Amino acid sequence: MSLALDALIVLTGCIHVLLAPYSKVEESFNLHAVHDVLMYGIRKLDQYDHFVFPGAVPRTFIGSVALAWTSYPIILLLNSCGFVLSKFDLQVIVRLVLTTFNAFGLCFLRRAVSRRFGRPTSFYFTIITISQFLVPFWMGRTLPNMFALVPVNVASGLLLSRPPNSPKPSPENVYTAIAMLTFTAVIFRAELVLLLGPLVLQSLLLRHVSFSGVVKVALVAGLASIVTTTAIDSYFWKTTVWPEFSGMYFNVVQGKSSEWGTSPPWTYFTLLLPKLLLFALPFSYFGFLMDPRIREALLPHVAFISLISLLGHKEWRFIVYVVPVFNVAAARAGRWMVSQRKSTLIGRLSFFAFCLMLLINAVGTMMFAMASIANYPGGVALKRFNDVHPPSLVPHGKVYHVHISNLAAQTGASLFLQEHAPPFPSTSLLSHTTSKNDTSKYPWTVYDKTENLTIDELSGSRDITHLITEWSPVEMRSRMRIWRIIDVDADAHITSLDGAAVPVGSGTVGVINGSAGWKINWDMIGAVKALRLQEFGRLISGSKWRDILWLSEKPMLWIYERR
């Protein structure tokens, strides 16, 4: 049973990766760092992407290098078995490796829950976790927070891992947890200091460890982490830098994070925590009230949320680390509710409420996942461009030059999708690859992400043969004599500025839709509310379920080619 539960957590994360393999701009630094380590090694730094797009503040390379090196032998094995067919497959494999690491962290915590609260509670922890959306969906994405989530979950597991009636964890576990959180705060996410502080204070007040021991561990772990990140990241950035300190100074001391928007202090508790936990949140509160062991585990995390609420800029990923422990609390409540005698009204209602929570979570996760899958038009567009224009079909003497707009770059057009241009993977990573020596037969494609170019500038540059852009044919109508949507149907047209009919094509390939959210047929809902059952029956009789609730899509990007 234990291995089956672990496998279920791993499988859930992997399914989310395979369903939504593309990436967003928030993931790009670490994802592209992994790409560069795999493609160039760690010596050809001048070729690295972060010197072209450095971002607002430097980020650490430690997680990216570790992920690339860990993925490398797995890629070699899969390639030898014929499973790696494109450069983009490398991105999928890297993300699968990351989600597996995060799953292992959750499995470690689950085993600690089993030891502390019993096997049934660990079972409910598993099904609650996989019924939610954000953690399983995002734990395979190369955000710094997802690199940090692994050691945070291991630290939480160390603090929980003890016999059911044991009054305190072993000092070794506490010191190890403090060292891991210190390492994670120094290297990956500085906000974890706000979680480390309450945990250390609680451990001291409950006499789990001594003050001198904490000081010694914190100093050793802190100094070792600072030296490690400064040495490694200064090498990759070619200047002396402690990335996480730079980020904290930029965002907190200089207050630059407020430029991304601010929210009221209660936002985490009233909006973002429910978004993370879905309907498991009330069960977490119940578990907090009913079991003092849960209160001990949860209090530092509540304090962390309260402290970080003092900062103006708020995002769910800043508090994602609390989700597993809140799920432990919900699982403890679920254990009590399910174990009640079903012969009593309380027992039946409790069992029904817990099952209903899981069902609502699962349905909500399915809806969120479906919307998110359709939320990466840039990745879809660039992959579609590559499929339509493989190097072997490029006319002799011609070079394709595709300009990738800002929206496309932010919604999935990663370096791993630049398949027809250097750097090409070595044959050990990808057997079916374009050889660097075949330029006469298979010319490279130029992938161009130059920012802030106007339609006129793009149209005036004869080198640019294709556009992936958010400009619709209506916005492009003054230039549709120069451009056409790929996969043109000559019968389709729009009216140009001078009144002439300009063919633009059906764009069945060149139009990329994105999610516009879920839509509800409010006429049917209104009929039910007004108890107009006959009208509701008439509305639903000729409808399918997709006519009641459906995922709406709208064109987000267009692929144009020069006429």
Image (spheres, helix red, strand yellow):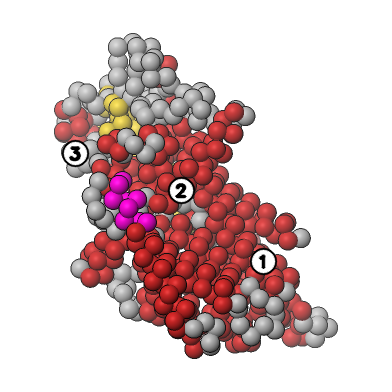
Indicate the quadrant containing the N terminus: top left, top right, bottom left or bottom right.
bottom right
Read off the residue under disc 3.
Answer: 453
Q: Quadrant of residue 513?
A: top left
Of the residues tagged 2 and 3, which is closer to the observer? 2
Read off the residue under disc 1.
Answer: 111
Instruction: Check whether the beta carbons of the residues at disc 2 and disc 3 lie within 8 A of each other.
Output: no
Report the span colored magenta: 228-236
Q: Specify whether 510 is left or right of 18.
A: left
Per the image, label 2 sits on a secondary structure element best described as helix
Q: CA distance from mark 1 to mark 3?
A: 54 Å
For disc 1, the neighbor class at 10 Å (few under 14, some 14 to 19, many from 20) is many
Q: CA distance from mark 2 to mark 3?
A: 37 Å
Residue toward you, 383 or 101: 101
Q: Position of residue 260 (x, y in %)?
A: 27, 63
Q: CA distance from mark 2 to mark 1?
A: 25 Å
Q: Is residue 229 magenta?
A: yes
